[in-house]
Amino acid sequence: MSTTSTEVRKRESGASSVSPWTWIVIAGALVVVVGSFLPWVKAITSTGSVTLNGVSTDGKFTLIFGAVGLICGVLAVYSDRIEWLFGTGMVLLVSAVFSGLDLATLPHPATAYTSLNWDVGIWLCFVGSLIGFLASIAAVEIYLRRKSS
C-alpha cells in the first residue's frame, strides 16, 4: 500500500488526528472570553439605565475560565494528549456552572430599579461554556476510540 506525500504531511502535522469537536471546544472557550467583556446586566431606573460589563462583575472569573480553556484547547490541537481536552472540558464545566448560577440568582429589583435584566454577555458565557463542555466530551470519546483501534 503506497501513501501519497499529502497523506504523509497530514500524519506528520497531526492535522488528521484533530477532531472537529476539538475546534468546537476552542470556539466555545473563545465565546466565553468574548462574553466576559460584553454587558452582563442592565438596570433601568426612573432616571435612566445602568449597564455593567462582565469584567466589572463576576465576568472576571469566566474570563479566567475561558482563557484557561482556550489555552488548553489550543494545546490539545498541537499535542497528542487527552489531558488537554479533558482539562478544557472541566474548566468549561466550571464556567457553565458559575455563569448558570449567576443567571439563576438574578436579584429582585430594588425599589430604585424599574427593571433588572441579564444582558447578552452572560448568556454567551453560559452557552459557550455548555457547548464547549459537551464538545469536549465528544472529542475525548473520539480520541479514545482512535487510540484503541
Image (spheres, grey):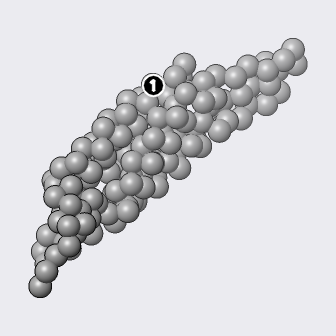
**Horizontal side, residue 57 vs residue 75: left or right:** right
Name above or below for residue 12 compared with residue 47: below
The amino acid sitting under disc 1 is Lys
Q: Quadrant of residue 133?
A: bottom left
Q: Please tell me whether mark 1 sits on a helix, a strand or a loop.
A: helix
Which residue sits furthest bottom?
Answer: 1
Name above or below for residue 107 compared with residue 57: below
Q: How many residues crowd mark 1 within 10 Å: few (<14), some (14–19), many (20+)? A: some
**Horizontal side, residue 137 vs residue 125: left or right:** left
Q: Quadrant of residue 11?
A: bottom left
Quadrant the C terminus occupies: bottom left
- Identify the residue at image location x=45%, y=25%: 60
Residue occupied by mark 1: 60
- Identify the residue at image location x=79%, y=20%: 49
Is residue 142 among the parts visible in the rendering?
yes
Query: Residue 8's spot in the image, x, y percent?
Result: 17, 66
Query: Residue 55's spot in the image, x, y percent?
Result: 52, 22
Q: Quadrant of residue 92?
A: top left
- Identify the residue at image location x=45%, y=48%: 28
- Identify the residue at image location x=38%, y=30%: 64
Query: Residue 2's spot in the image, x, y percent?
Result: 13, 80
